[in-house]
Amino acid sequence: MTSDVDSIVRLMARFARGIDLRDWTLYRSVFTDQIDIDYTSYRPGSEGRFRADDWVDRGRMLFPGLSASQHFLSNFDISVDSAEGTGRVVAYVRAEHVLPDAAGDAVFTIGGFYTDDVVRVDDDWRICAKRLTVLWNTGNPQVLTLARERAAELARSPGEDG
C-alpha cells in the first residue's frame, strides 16, 4: 500500500510533468475544482480563487509559447493529517523557461519554493491551494512575455491539419 507521503510526492511530480509536457489533462487532474492561488511574489496581483479549468487555461496562454520548460521540485517537507484527509507540502522549485530569441538570453529561471495545501479526493490527493515564493531569478525575463505573445499567435493560427 502506498503511503500518503508517497502519493503526495507523485502528485507534485504530475504537476510538474503536466505543465512541462503541456499535457493539460494531466495538469488539470492535480487540482481540486476550485483552487486558491498566490503568485504575488512573482507578479503582484496574481492571487485569488480560480476554477481549476480557468487556471489550466492560463497555462495554455503561456507555456505553448515556450520552446521548453522544466520545473524541478525537491526538498519536500510534507505534513499529513490522514484522518482529516488534508496536508501541506513545501517544496523547492527551480523553473527553467526556454525560448530562443536573438534579442537576448534564451532562458529565464525562477528559484524559490511552493507551499501547497492538498486534500484527499476519493482515493487520490489534489492541490487545493498553491503559493509560489520567489527567492531569486536569473536570465531574460522577456522570455515569458515573448512566450505569451507566441502562444497567442499559435492559438489564433489554424492547425497544420486544417
Image (cartoon, rainbow, N blue to C red):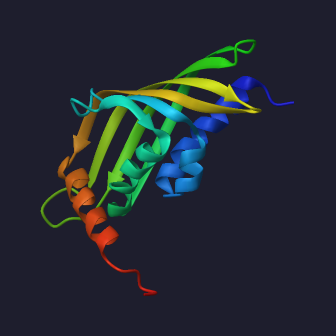
Which of the pair 36/9 is nearer the observer?
Answer: 36
Left or right relative to 110: residue 56: right
The x, y position of residue 43, in whole percent, is 23, 34
The image quadrant that residue 86 belongs to is: top right
Q: Where is residue 120 in the image (x, y as percent from the top left)?
A: 68, 26
Answer above or below: position of 107 versus 3: below
Where is residue 139? Give x, y as percent: 22, 46
Q: Out of 29 and 1, give the one closest to the viewer.
A: 29
With respect to residue 36, does 65 lie above or below?
A: below
Count of marks placed on residues: 0
Toward the right, the furthest residue is 1
Where is residue 4? Give x, y as percent: 73, 24
User: Is residue 73 placed above or below 161 in the rendered structure?
Assistant: above
Q: Which residue is drawn at 40% across and 59% down?
A: 68
Q: In this view, does 81 lie to the left or right of 59?
A: right
Q: Out of 87 and 111, give the one closest to the viewer.
A: 87
Q: Residue at x 32, y 38 (%)?
A: 110
On the rendered image, what quadrant is the N terminus found in?
Answer: top right
- The extreme left residue here reads 103
Q: Can residue 38 be seen in this view?
A: no
Question: Can residue 150 be spotted in the picture?
Answer: yes
Which one is nearer the viewer's eye here, 90 or 117?
117
What is the quadrant of the C terminus in the image?
A: bottom left
Left/right placement of residue 58 relative to residue 91 reads left
What residue do we see at 41% from left, 51% from top? 57
Please, is residue 11 above or below residue 161 in the view?
Answer: above
